[in-house]
Image: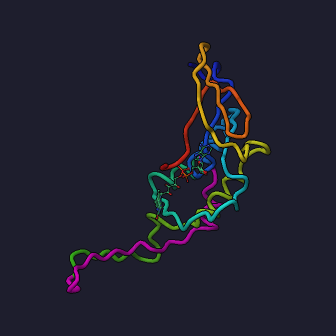
Amino acid sequence: MSKNEVRRIAIIGAGPGGLILARILQLKGIEVQVYEREHSIDDRSQGGTLDLHVESGQYALRTAELFDQFLAHCRPEGQDMRILDKRGTVYWEEASSENNFDRPEIDRRDLRQLLLESLKANTIMQGHTLQNVERLDNGQHKLVFSNGVTETADLLVGADGAW
Ligand SMILES: Cc1cc2nc3c(=O)[nH]c(=O)nc-3n(C[C@H](O)[C@H](O)[C@H](O)COP(=O)(O)OP(=O)(O)OC[C@H]3O[C@@H](n4cnc5c(N)ncnc54)[C@H](O)[C@@H]3O)c2cc1C
């Protein structure tokens, strides 16, 4: 399917993966809708910190033109590593300088918030848990949500996380 034929892109999941994809698509002028099962960002604890590596998370944030916002929230910490046995014999030791920026930490909530704020209004449909997907004869996908809503999409992206 060419870019011109894809009219409706649906992303399932408003975690870091789904949100950053939506942001990059919008930067390129492509319409996108994100469906998220949670009703708000504070529906549940957002977990701890994520470390973003240069070649993956940091690269994605640069592509999304959000690297400065990331810098305002991240902390270059937790990058030292030491492996030892129960007797205290050290097998591996990696101490990094304070300026090491290989994989700084950011709170998952802060990351998600800055991504949410970067999107156009009404991009995210909260409270939409995808229950079933049906491929239609015309190549589209019929999305069925547990709240009774149904939608169709030309391209469906699963960004629903590790589970
Ligand atoms: C146990 C565990 C520990 C981790 N620890 C670390 C760590 O210490 N440091 C680190 O950097 N990374 C860690 N990670 C990785 C980090 O959590 C992931 O890289 C990051 O959260 C992935 O983002 P994502 O957007 O792909 O998925 P997620 O953050 O999981 O987001 C998926 C979203 O999809 C939504 N969703 C799910 N199912 C549906 C559905 N049916 N319909 C609609 N919405 C749906 C969810 O509510 C969620 O908002 C860990 C991951 C796991 C699983």
Q: Quadrant of residue 123?
A: top right
x 44%, y 64%: residue: 102
* Range covered by the magenta-colored residues: 64-89
Q: Quadrant of residue 28?
A: top right
Based on the picture, tell me whether residue 92 belongs to the magenta stretch.
no
Q: Is residue 119 above or below residue 97?
A: above
x 71%, y 30%: residue: 150
x 20%, y 83%: residue: 89
Q: How is the image coloured?
A: rainbow
Based on the picture, tell me whether residue 88 belongs to the magenta stretch.
yes
Q: Is residue 136 above or below residue 61?
A: above
Judged left or right of residue 134, residue 151 is: right
Residue 43 lies, in percent from the top left, at: 69, 59
Q: Is residue 104 above or below residue 129?
A: below
Front residue of 6 and 58 = 6
Label tally:
0
Residue 132 lies, in percent from the top left, at: 59, 32
